Amino acid sequence: MATFLANLHTSPRTIYLVRHGESYPNQYKQDPGLSETGTTFTQQLKLFFLDHRKKSDRPLAIWTSAKKRSLEMAAILQQSYPVCHKPQLAELNMGICTGLSEYDIQSYLDLAMRLEFVILELEKAKCDVVICAHDTVLKCLYAYFLDRPDNEIPFLTFPRHLVFEITPRAYGYTESRYFVHPVALESEPGYTPIYENEFKVYTDRE
């Protein structure tokens, strides 16, 4: 707890959660690379951030896992932004459906414990951060920042090509979502704001 509190700060920052680009085949042990659609989406994602943040003076960093599809995304995004690979951002081991033994299977609790270090780094980050990861990872991070109950985590959804923009604030946060078109639009950053709202989280004293 003391370590966690020591890393908290009130500097403004924004956290973006983005599901990694489409890969094929989508099997855990094969560690596939990006499909053609996944590559095009990543190029559009870079244009989205360049356009969406052109009025921001805060630096932006990209955090990804060390999976092949994430490395291929990073190769495109790092043309404009610094990229950091974090093994803790690897997806949840989904079990027998992905060819794993009972000893390899992980729960969301296992994943949440693995992400503790990443959360501490996010809490002390002074720059804006983009997390490009598997949807199981994004569910845990989203639930942490938006204070969602543990039993909701497996049922949260992170569709492809959607950017979740979260800005922590005192006793709450703002959240916006943007659909980034996964096709080239003549080098234009084609994206659509589809959800913009503000939520408040109040203490028992209020």
Image: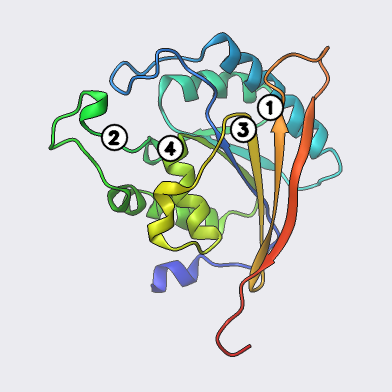
Residue 143, percent from left and from top = 49, 56
In space, the residues marked 3 and 4 are separated at their CA atoms by: 13 Å
Which image quarter: residue 106?
A: top left
Residue position for label 3: 82
Q: Are marks 2 and 3 in contact (CB under 8 Å)?
A: no
Residue 94 badge: 2
> Could you say where residue 54 lies in the image, as x and y percent from the top left?
84, 38
Write the residue at 40% across / 48% down.
Answer: 154
Query: Distance of mark 4 from mark 1, alpha carbons?
Result: 20 Å
Q: In the displayed structure, would residue 132 be above or below residue 169?
A: above
CA distance separating discs 2 and 4: 20 Å
Q: Is residue 175 above or below residue 78?
A: below
Establish if 170 lies above or below 13: below
Mark 2 or mark 4, which has the lower sequence index?
4
Q: Mark 4 is on which residue type?
A: Lys
Q: Residue furthest top?
A: 36
Looking at the rendered structure, the kind of residue marked 1 is: Leu
Which amino acid, mark 2?
Met
Q: Is residue 139 left or right of residue 114?
A: right
**Disc number placed over residue 45 in the picture, else none:** 1
- Which image quadrant for residue 79? top right
Q: Residue at x 33, y 38 (%)?
A: 92
Q: Give the secondary structure at mark 2.
A: loop
Q: Position of residue 114 (x, y in %)?
A: 33, 49
The kind of secondary structure element at disc 4 is loop
According to the picture, the residue beneath numbered tag 4 turns out to be 86
